[in-house]
Amino acid sequence: MTMQRGKDILLKLEDPAGSSIFVTMAGLRARTISLNAKTVDTTNADSIGAWRELLPGAGVKSLSVSGSGVFTDTAADEAVRAAFFGQEARRWQLIIPGFGTLDGLMQIAALDYAGDFDGEAVYSLTLASAGAISFTPL
């Protein structure tokens, strides 16, 4: 298995919404992608050996993405600001080398800007899935 560089993970936002034109989030230095699946516990008095039982396919799936980087004031930064202030669920793509592409509607749950007087301006954002997410393996 070939190792992958973290900097090659791309986060892209559709701009404008519905256009199928994606802009890459510039300046990202760190990103975390979390896939979650809530389980539905169906354990009852008849469960064999009192072992927990789960109902297959009944849980809620979600995806969250967090990232941070250097503020670059590019077209992607403007699209993020517009999506945040409009509280829009927009289509995002996450391209993970050697794994695949996650694609679907997400909403910006948090957007932070910071900077020290003798350093660069930075930002961080958190995305939350807002609908079905598709996966296309590479």
Image (tube, rainbow, N blue to C red):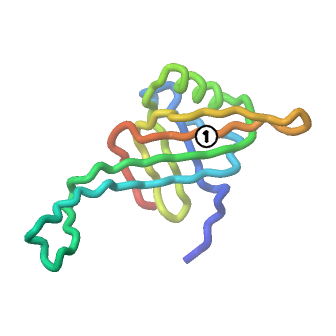
- The amino acid type of the residue labelled 1 equals Thr
* Callout 1 crowding tier (Cα within 10 Å): few <14, some 14–19, many ≥20: some
In which quarter of the view is residue 28 placed? top right
Residue 107 appears at what percent x and percent y?
46, 33
The residue at 49%/44% (across/down) is 93
**Residue at screen point 59% across, 74% down:** 2
Q: Nearer the viewer, residue 96 or 22?
A: 96
Of the 4 image quadrants, the one containing the N terminus is bottom right
Q: Is residue 74 left or right of residue 106?
A: right
Could you tell me which secondary element the residue under label 1 belongs to? strand
Q: Residue at x 13, y 77 (%)?
A: 48
**Left or right: 56 with respect to 67?**
left
Tag count in the figure?
A: 1
Q: Residue at x 46, y 58 (%)?
A: 100
Residue 5 relative to residue 12: left or right: right
Residue nearest the observer in this picture, 137 or 58: 58
Q: Position of residue 37 (x, y in %)?
A: 34, 55
Whole-percent x and y of residue 47?
Answer: 13, 72
The relative height of residue 119 versus residue 18 in the rendered view (above or below) is: below
Residue under circle 1?
A: 24
Kindly give the residue lying farthest to the left in the view shown.
46
